[in-house]
Image (cartoon, helix red, strand yellow):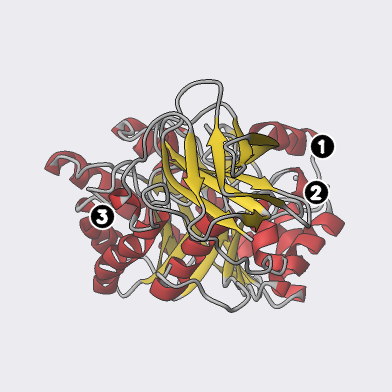
Amino acid sequence: MTAAFARPRSACVALAAWLFLGAPAAAETPTTERPRLDLVFVQPDIDFLDRSAMGADLDRAVELGVSEVIVQYLAHGDSRLPPIDPTHPDPVLWFLDLAHERGLRVWLGTWELAVTWRRDEVPLNIWRRIADLGAGLVEDVAGRYHGHPAFAGWYWTPEAVWPESPAPNRLEALTWTTKKALLRIRAASPNAPVAIVLGPSYGEGNLLSRSWCRYIEATSPERVVVMDGVGMGHLDASLAGALYEQVDTCAARAGAVVVSDIEFFGPEDLGLAPSRERMQRQYDEARAKTTVVGAFDLNHHLRPGTPGHAFLFDDPPPARQSVPLVDPSHNPPEAWRERARLDYGIHQAAFADGAQRFTRLEVITREHHPEYVVAAAVGSDGALTDLGPASPEHGPGRNELTWTWEGPENGAAGVAFRMSTKSGTMDAVELRAYR
């Protein structure tokens, strides 16, 4: 991942505990089918030590239709997980056994250093170090895991996130370093497939670096995992399909299968959950454009109580009837980059058909987000009735928030409604009302 955002991880404390314990932690039109996944990521944190918890997680994966799991890494930072202590059970073998009992296949990740996804320009000496560590780890543990019936292949954990094509010499060094490491992995684990991972950086004008084609061709993986970048705030959900298509063009030259990695979280800097509308677009784009649809990750961002879990497992909310508004207060939902801003300040919209009863109000703000938003009903005499605060979620666009007021069963009534803030600006692109 890139510099300003850190992909949510929960590694360091958990890994220290693990070592200490020594045991063994869219398409334009939304789909109507219940979302299903082909693959999920799992982070090997403290849950890995709990067979019951991990088994329950894998049961949820099976319920989603999952057939493959990627264990994010077997080593993180300076901490190497297996082998831990020959007198204690190996938690990776535990996991492989649990997966096999459920008919799941497992890709095992290599070595992760956070700098590879926190910086756009990773120093070459760091890339060489992680390549050597990752290849060396596979050479040491391949004999333990390669022959397990649940083992599917190796996941090359270092994330290639390049905002621009590197200079020719740098590209050659990055590519050759990775290629040599993968040759070592293939020699240590003959016939085992290898997956690499790519991700977009900021800016819709450069969805992916041109150098990725060279990188994929040279490393010749069996799988290319593509992070959609939406949860990180790097890319708008409406552009994820174009990202998958461009990577697929590169991957086809190497005979590789493209795997989508949907980010049902973030962005982390906002600290807000994604809206269902945003997640639906992410899922629809992945399902329409990739052969294998995956998501990050099972035991954190898809655990019970998260928006991702609710989107995948819960029935969608009943459809609401939209209330027509008088133009220009209602800005039709178009492509994210084409949506013009409304006026700054207080936003008020009149109902096209006069007085209406409504149960839900929304205002979508962009970039200059207020600290809070309150809703009010406007009577025929212009009097305001305070309705209370609206709650924000991330989406539908990359730099957009949807602020929602939900009323009681009978809702509220008026000839118009107002969404406003008493703190800061309120740069809105759309107002919505529902019966």
- Outermost residue, right direction? 52
Between the C-alphas of marks 1 and 3, the distance is 41 Å
Residue 95's x, y, as percent? 73, 60
Which quarter of the rendering shows the N terminus?
Answer: top left
For the residue pair 329 and 294, the one nearer the viewer reads as 329
Could you give the CA–CA distance between mark 2 and mark 1, rounded to whole angstroms? 9 Å
Which residue is pictured at 27% across the width and 44% down the height? 174
Q: Residue furthest front?
A: 381
Q: Position of residue 224 (x, y in %)?
A: 39, 63
Up-down relation of residue 65 to residue 415 (above or below): below
Q: Is residue 142 visible?
A: no
Which quadrant is home to the C terminus? bottom right
Disc 3 marks a residue whose amino acid type is Trp
Q: Which residue is labeled 2 in the image?
A: 49
Residue at the (25%, 69%) spot, across then down: 249
Residue at the spot 59% in from the left edge and 39% down from the top edge: 381
Tell me what residue is drawn at x 66 percent, y 70 percent: 148
Left/right of residue 102 with respect to residue 380 in the rendered view: right
Kind of residue at disc 2: Leu
Label 3 and label 2: CA atoms lie apart by 37 Å
Foreground tag (2 vs 1): 2
Q: Please, what is the three-letter code of the amino acid marked with disc 1?
A: Leu
Tell me which corner region of the image, top left, top right, bottom left or bottom right, holds residue 238.
bottom left
* Label whose residue precedes the other's in the sequence (1 or 3): 1
Apparent side of residue 156 relative to residue 69 in the rendered image (left or right): left
Check disc 1 and report its element: helix, strand or loop: helix
Label 3 SS: helix
Marks 2 and 3: in contact by CB < 8 Å? no
**Percent from the top left, x then y, of residue 322?**
55, 63
Mark 2, Cα crowd under 10 Å, few <14 / some 14-19 / many 20+, is many
Relative height, residue 357 to residue 103 (above, below): above
